[in-house]
Structures are given as C-alpha cells and as structure tokens.
Image (cartoon, helix red, strand yellow):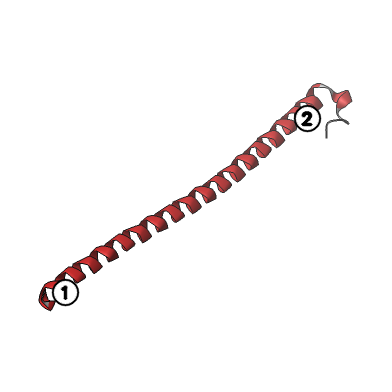
C-alpha cells in the first residue's frame, strides 16, 4: 500500500469522526438548553400562577368585606 492511497482514507475517517462528535456536541447542547428552558418556564409559570391566585383571593375578600359593610351597617366594625 502506498502512502498516497492511505492519506485520503485517514483524512476521510478523521472528517467522519469530527462530524459525528460535532453532531453529538450539538445534540447535547440542544438537550441541555431545552432542559434549562423548560425548568425556567415551569418555575416562572408556577410563580405567576401562584401570584395570580393570591391576587384573585385578595380581590374576592375585599369585595365580600365591602358588600358586608354596605348591606349590614351594624357589622361594619367587623369588616375592615
């Protein structure tokens, strides 16, 4: 076997290896990013949902107290 016949094969093998490792790296990076993205989205979504429910609860209690104050003036001291 001459050297001139071996070199292209070696170069091709190296290129294939580089391509495979590159694809693996890209896949790992994409997976890592998607995992982080999903976690961040989940955290912020849960936070927003909790805040929203708290806000609604506050609003409801305020309405109830306001209505109680209007309809029963003798209970106005209990509803603040």
Residue 71 placement (x, y as % from top left) = 79, 21
Q: Give the percent coordinates (x, y) of residue 11.
A: 20, 71
Pointer 1 residue: 7
Front residue of 46/65: it is 46
Badge 2: few (under 14), some or many (20 or more) residues near its Cα, within 10 Å?
A: some
Q: Nearer the viewer, residue 38 or 60?
A: 38
Residue 64, given in percent of the width and then of the height, sits at 75, 27
Q: Is residue 38 above or below residue 23?
A: above
Quadrant containing the C terminus in the rendered view: top right
Does residue 53 lie above or below 19 as drawn? above
Q: Residue at x 45, y 55 (%)?
A: 32
Residue at position x 17%, y 68% in the image = 9
Secondary structure at badge 1 equals: helix
Mark 1 Cα-neighbour bin, 10 Å: few <14, some 14–19, many ≥20 = few
- At x 89% / y 24%, what residue is drawn? 74
Q: Quadrant of the N terminus?
A: bottom left
Query: Measuring 81% from the left and 27% from the top, which residue is drawn there?
Result: 69
> Which quarter of the picture shows residue 46?
top right
Label 2 to label 1, Cα distance in Å?
Answer: 86 Å
Tag 2 residue: 65
Q: Which of pointers 2 and 1 lies earlier in the amino acid sequence? A: 1
Residue closer to the observer: 2 or 75: 2
Left or right relative to 34: residue 75: right
């Amino acid at each position: 076997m001459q050297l001139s016949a071996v070199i292209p094969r070696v170069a091709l093998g190296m290129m294939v290896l580089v391509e495979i490792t590159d694809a693996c790296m890209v896949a790992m990076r994409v997976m890592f990013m998607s995992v982080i993205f999903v976690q961040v989205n989940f955290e912020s979504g849960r936070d927003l949902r909790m805040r929203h429910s708290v806000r609604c609860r506050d609003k409801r209690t305020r309405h109830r107290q306001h209505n109680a104050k209007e309809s029963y003036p003798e209970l106005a001291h209990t509803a603040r």
